């Protein structure tokens, strides 16, 4: 049975349809918004994976290029591995959905979200999250939803739900909010230094639309009326649980109250785990996994109790305290900018590199191809947490963390017209005990300052945590790895002293209130300002000079019609300039030419060569010319690249010249003066005018032209394109 439900969002109809597409999936919903259509399908295994202690959920988001009437690039002409955009969108769908499944649900579940039609105005990611939630609601798979997701922009002070790409270009915020009808589940986005109050207001506006979309999904689910599958609750083993608690509870509580380094805590905790497992393995054979789960629950309970009841954390800090911070810059002398930011046991070594227009990243997807001049790449090697793993290409976590840090800094990067460099920041996490993405933001800001990038302001980031049991609530600043793992929230907030630049919140519970969000944001601001003050003691303004190893850029504007002559046939001219100068050159379609070279002399040489190519001959100007051809009536010389004129034999010297070869030879460099440009664009040049006694050269040339008339038909002109200019006859 086909069921269709509709709602109006921002003046456009949002349609949810099920029963027509992908009927063999457990659930399938097509969401249509304007001309964008996104299909979400869900399939869940009927039996749980009993050997796993986590929920095996897969969420994949893909964009069909055909959705925008495009054919994929590449040799195979088909979609391949997911793009960075698709990976980020998958995360945007996964994160709000994941906490909405029952705690004990272990059935493998796969959600596939595909954009089949794109109006190239609205992104499919938030529509995909709504479609995924609706597909789960009609599938019968245990899901404590619905959830909905919207994007919020603000243009000229007015909030817009699900703004177009064009509207986002003029928006001072890009906020993605996900939630249930009565709480917030996830928030992510970037902003141009907005206040905490403005961010909360954006979330409230978004949540109003979320409530309406959730209601629509409930209507759709009621129309389908799926039979909900039961959740296989693991058997309770009271005796085993009692023995584990008796042996480990006191020891784990003592550990939670003892200040230890990360390595020390891991060692002592593992010792407790090993002791209990060894003691019970004979009495409870085959229950190793269960024992580990029970110990994990006791460890979690111990940490949370210490925080809620004692107001103390694993490292002895108060709830709002920030770990000790050290900042260093200039450690890597051959990089353009470098920094080492250490906060507690989390450390980022970050570099900033300046490049040219040619170094920009090209972005191809559903939208028309664009370029990106600011990039931030985040790397998380296994040694940072004392592990051994195969080095692979960046995973979802690395891409997500890098994207967040990139958005945190992006709005503070100077505009291209003011600083025409491509900028790449690379953060390598050397050690980690929580908040490594926020350490990247701080290190990135320091490295950019040290590189001499005229940033508008310094940026810092902080990760906030939450422990909530009933009415007891503790908000934690600058969380540790265990506080993230065993807590209820990871809320990352970045910004300047003026306001917020980026944020990302994930929770493990079924939503939090605006009151908690408001408290967390206020506490995050206090922490952020503290971190900024510490960073300012190392460097508080960008370096006034670039690194000696950074390319120097010079920019000129040439007439559009001169782009071809500068490039030359088959790129001959531009290749010659690059070869002779050693500079890197990029020419835009509007005639903007950017010249890059580490050595100033190289850039200056390239600039001069380009100027000569586009320079127009100017009457009365003196030129250094090269003799290119000798005729009986004069010499053809090149005064500018590709621009030749005639020095008539009468204008070679103040004395009468019998043979041209008596005065000049092929390849000679001589100075000439441009006397006139005739009606056909031919250049009349004189060497004589520059010699003592040649003051009357112009008058003599004018009289000669009168005697000959407009054309001299008695001499062989030998007109040649682009260089046969000037008179051909001899006086």
Image (cartoon, rainbow, N blue to C red):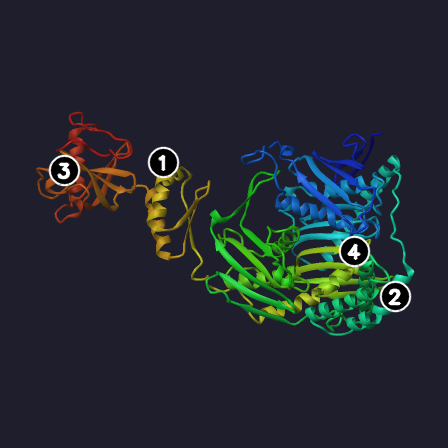
> Marks 2 and 3: which is nearer the front?
2
Q: Earlier in the sequence, mark 3 or mark 4?
A: 4
The residue carrying mark 3 is 649
Q: CA distance from mark 2 to mark 3?
A: 114 Å
The residue carrying mark 1 is 569
Q: Earlier in the sequence, mark 2 or mark 1?
A: 2
Helix, strand or loop at mark 2: helix
Q: Position of residue 455 (x, y in %)?
A: 55, 59
Instruction: Mark yes or no: residue 344 visible.
Output: yes
Dot 2 and dot 4 residues touching (CB under 8 Å): no
> Marks 3 and 4: which is nearer the front?
4
Q: Earlier in the sequence, mark 1 or mark 4?
A: 4
Q: Earlier in the sequence, mark 2 or mark 4?
A: 2
Q: Nearer the viewer, residue 245 or 668?
A: 245
Is residue 523 positioned above or below 155 on the image?
below
- Is residue 269 shown left or right of residue 364? right
Dot 1 and dot 3 residues touching (CB under 8 Å): no
Q: CA distance from mark 2 to mark 1?
A: 85 Å
- Is residue 276 shown left or right of residue 71? right
Q: CA distance from mark 3 to mark 4?
A: 91 Å
Q: Position of residue 699 (x, y in %)?
A: 17, 40
Name the quadrant of the C terminus: top left
Instruction: Mark yes or no: residue 498 visible.
Output: no
Mark 2 neighbour class, 10 Å CA radius: few under 14, some 14 to 19, many 20 or more: some
Which label was assigned to residue 508?
A: 4
Residue at coordinates 54% horizontally, 62% vertically from top-left?
A: 447
């Amino acid at each position: 049975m086909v069921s269709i439900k509709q709602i109006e969002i921002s003046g456009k109809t949002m349609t949810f349809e099920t029963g027509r597409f992908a009927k063999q999936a457990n659930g399938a919903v097509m969401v249509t918004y304007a001309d964008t259509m996104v299909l979400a399908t869900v399939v869940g295994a009927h039996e749980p994976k009993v050997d796993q202690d986590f929920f095996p959920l897969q969420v994949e988001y893909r964009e069909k290029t055909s959705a925008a009437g495009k054919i994929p690039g590449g040799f195979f002409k088909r979609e391949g591995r997911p793009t960075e955009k698709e990976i980020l969108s998958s995360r945007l769908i996964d994160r709000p959905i994941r906490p909405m499944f029952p705690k004990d649900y272990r059935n493998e579940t796969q959600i596939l979200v595909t954009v089949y039609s794109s109006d190239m105005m609205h992104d499919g990611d938030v529509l995909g999250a709504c479609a995924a939630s609706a597909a789960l609601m009609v599938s019968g798979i245990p899901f404590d939803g619905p959830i909905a997701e919207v994007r919020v922009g603000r243009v000229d002070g007015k909030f817009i739900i699900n703004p177009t790409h064009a509207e986002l270009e003029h928006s001072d915020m890009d906020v993605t909010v996900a939630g249930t009808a009565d709480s917030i589940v996830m928030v992510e986005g970037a902003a141009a230094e907005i206040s905490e109050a403005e961010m909360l207001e954006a979330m409230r506006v978004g949540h109003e639309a979320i409530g309406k979309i959730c209601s629509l999904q409930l209507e759709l689910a009621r129309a389908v009326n799926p039979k909900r599958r039961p959740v296989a609750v693991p058997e309770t083993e009271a005796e085993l649980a009692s023995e584990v608690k008796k042996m480990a509870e006191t020891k784990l509580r003592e550990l939670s109250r003892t200040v230890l380094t990360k390595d020390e805590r891991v060692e002592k905790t593992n010792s407790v785990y090993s002791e209990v497992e060894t003691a019970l393995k004979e009495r409870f054979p085959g229950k190793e996994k269960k024992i580990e789960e029970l110990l994990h629950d006791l460890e979690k309970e111990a940490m949370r109790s210490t925080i809620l009841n004692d107001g103390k954390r694993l490292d002895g800090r108060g709830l709002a305290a920030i770990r000790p911070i050290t900042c260093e810059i200039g450690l890597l002398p051959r990089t353009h900018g470098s920094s080492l930011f250490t906060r507690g046991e989390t450390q980022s070594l970050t570099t900033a590199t300046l490049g040219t227009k040619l170094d920009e990243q090209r972005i191809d997807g559903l939208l028309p191809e664009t370029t990106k001049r600011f990039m931030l790449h985040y790397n998380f090697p296994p040694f940072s947490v004392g592990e051994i793993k195969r080095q692979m290409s960046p995973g979802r976590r690395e891409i997500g963390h890098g994207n967040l840090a990139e958005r945190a800094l992006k709005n503070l990067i100077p505009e291209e017209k003011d600083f025409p460099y491509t900028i790449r920041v690379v953060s390598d996490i050397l050690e980690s005990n929580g908040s490594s993405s926020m350490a990247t933001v701080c290190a990135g800001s320091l490295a950019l300052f040290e590189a001499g990038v005229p940033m508008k302001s310094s940026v810092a980031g902080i990760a906030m945590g939450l422990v909530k049991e009933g009415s007891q609530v503790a908000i934690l600043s600058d969380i540790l790895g265990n506080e993230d793992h065993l807590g209820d929230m990871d809320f990352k907030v970045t910004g300047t002293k003026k306001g917020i630049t980026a944020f990302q919140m994930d929770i493990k519970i079924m939503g939090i209130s605006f009151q908690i969000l408001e408290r967390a944001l206020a506490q995050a601001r206090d922490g952020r300002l503290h971190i900024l003050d510490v960073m300012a003691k190392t460097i508080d303004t960008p370096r006034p000079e670039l690194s000696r190893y950074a390319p120097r850029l010079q920019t000129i504007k040439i007439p559009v019609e001169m782009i071809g002559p500068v490039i030359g046939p088959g790129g001959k001219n531009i290749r010659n300039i690059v070869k002779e100068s050693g500079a890197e050159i990029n020419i835009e379609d509007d005639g903007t030419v950017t010249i890059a070279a580490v050595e100033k002399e190289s850039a200056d040489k390239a600039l001069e060569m380009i100027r000569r190519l586009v320079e127009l001959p100017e009457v009365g100007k003196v030129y250094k010319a090269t003799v290119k051809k000798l005729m009986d009536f004069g010499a053809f010389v090149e005064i500018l690249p590709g621009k030749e004129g005639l020095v008539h034999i009468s204008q070679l010297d103040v004395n009468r010249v019998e043979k041209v070869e008596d005065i000049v030879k092929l390849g000679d460099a001589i100075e000439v003066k441009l006397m006139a440009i005739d009606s056909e664009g031919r250049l009349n040049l004189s060497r004589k005018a520059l010699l003592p006694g040649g003051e009357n050269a112009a008058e003599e040339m004018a009289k000669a032209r009168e005697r000959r008339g407009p054309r001299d038909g008695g001499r062989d002109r030998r007109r040649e394109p682009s260089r046969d200019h000037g008179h051909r006859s001899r006086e």
